[in-house]
Amino acid sequence: MSVLIKNGRIITASSDNVADIFIDGEQIKVIGENLDFEADTIIDASGLFVFPGGIDPHVHLDMPFMGTSSSDNYETGTRAALHGGTTMVIDFVLQKQGNSLQSALEEWRSRSDNNCVGDYSFHMAVTDFNENTKKEIQHMVEKEGISSFKTFMAYKGALMIDDRQMVGLMQEVKKQKGMVIVHATNGDMIDYLVAKHKAEGKLSPLYHYLSQPEVTESEASGRFADMANYTGCPGYIVHLTCEGALNAVRNATSRNQKVFVETCIQYLTLDSSLYEKDFEGAKWVMSPPLREKKDQETLWAGINQGLVEVVATDHCPFNWEQKLMGKNDFSKIPNGHPAIEHRMELLYSEGVGKGKISLNKYVEMSSTNAAKLFGMFPRKGTIAVGSDADIILFNPNAKHSISVDTHHMNVDYSAYEGWKLTGKVETVLLRGQVAIDNGECTVKKGYGKYIKRSKLTGIL
Ligand code: URP
Ligand code: ZN
Ligand code: ZN
């Protein structure tokens, strides 16, 4: 199959020009003006932006969590991602404490294999670092293509590791040329505040928010940065939400350290006033919680200051019935919200459309930096000869709105219901195949490929 895309405005992280793209098979073969190749499919992209396919490096599909499972499986989740222009996701394998990394990987593969519509990869969450786990790190990096290791500084008893394990893991991951990534909040402090609020009979979703104040995140972010600095291990903080945490990263730069930062689209666009809606606030119960307007300003500024590298989603959807598990106790509300489908359009509309970020920055945040940081560049994350033909044709003027009635995620509410956006994904190509065409998905489950990732350099 060959495809010729004509006259689109091709925007990468570092370039912006009108040209044609010739694709043969899965890769881009030629980029140039007035290309005159014969092709099976010719697409006129006049007036459209041509972006590299989005990469969301933080999603949880079909994940057993808090007594239930996230409601999007690998098929529905990656299909919804494609509808929104995200051609590749990185999901998390969670080691069970007491068990091996390999057994967790096999369990996750039993759910993901042959079920993805879009491309995918895995981070490995190390929840129990010991002499046995240590021996598995090299295998994960060299044989399984998993070079990023997730750690939790919270969720004690299930996922959290202590600082002793963190330092040991960092030393091994550095040796094997990987990266440690972290959910950086102070688990003990949060557990104390949760117990205190419950003892006082404060049980609504608002107390989820009040149990995770900014200091719980800034303290843990600073501690993580200190341990990464001490060990020399590349470090990346996932879903960073607030001014205090970003300042901990900023402070680390004064000793010439680079800590990579991911924020998520919800922390840029939604705020904690949503927790004042009584139990409806459960729709936005996630960890860390939504923050304040001043934190949104800090995050947008952090993107332009080069302190924030990636905008992800932490997509972890639960149906309303599942959220109701915490009707009488906020600590039982499954944590997470649905966003995999909306990240690219929200970031465009709220970011580029409102003059907060440039078009090149948009591409960097939504695709290129994730590809570079997680060992997939230039195969993924750009539009270049030899790269996978993962391409979005984007209409910058189309107006539309978000609703549960029209989204493709397997979840019965929208966290962005009624939001009006400018800019819409019209066509998506994944490895040379038209995958989304005017709102229709034209590839089947099983088309999505597992992408093995390289060793990581810890530089962009
Ligand atoms: O609330 C969230 N974030 N749920 C998913 C698990 C995690 O902490 O990333
Ligand atoms: Zn997390
Ligand atoms: Zn997460």
Image (cartoon, rainbow, N blue to C red):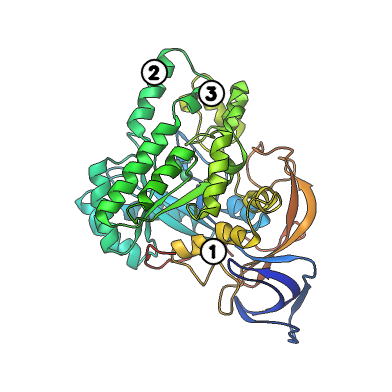
Tell me residue 451's x, y (percent).
48, 65
Q: Nearer the viewer, residue 105 or 168?
A: 168
Q: Give neighbour class at mark 2: few <14, some 14-19, many 20+ (Cα, 10 Å).
A: few
**Which tag, 1 or 3, sits closer to the chain's start?**
3
Total numbered labels: 3
Left or right of 445: which side holds 235?
left
Q: Circle 3 is placed at which residue position?
A: 206
* Residue 321 seen by the camera: no
Q: Circle 2 is placed at which residue position?
A: 196
Q: Circle 1 is placed at which residue position?
A: 368
Say what secondary structure mark 1 lies in. Answer: helix
Q: Looking at this view, name the residue that lies furthest to the front.
A: 254
The amino acid type found where label 2 is placed reads Lys
Q: Nearer the viewer, residue 303 or 240?
A: 303
Say what secondary structure mark 2 lies in. Answer: helix
**Which tag, 1 or 2, sits closer to the chain's start?**
2
Tell me residue 66's x, y (percent).
45, 34
Is ligand 1 closer than 8 angstroms to the Cβ of mark 2? no
Tell me residue 212's x, y (percent).
44, 30
Q: Pointer 2 and pointer 3: residues touching (CB < 8 Å)?
A: no
Say what secondary structure mark 3 lies in. Answer: helix
* Residue 157 seen by the camera: yes
Left or right of 431: which side holds 139?
left
**Which tag, 2 or 3, sits closer to the chain's start?**
2
Residue sitting at x 75%, y 56%: 439
Q: Looking at this view, name the residue that lies furthest to the top.
A: 200
Residue sitting at x 51%, y 61%: 369
Q: Give neighbour class at mark 1: few <14, some 14-19, many 20+ (Cα, 10 Å).
A: many
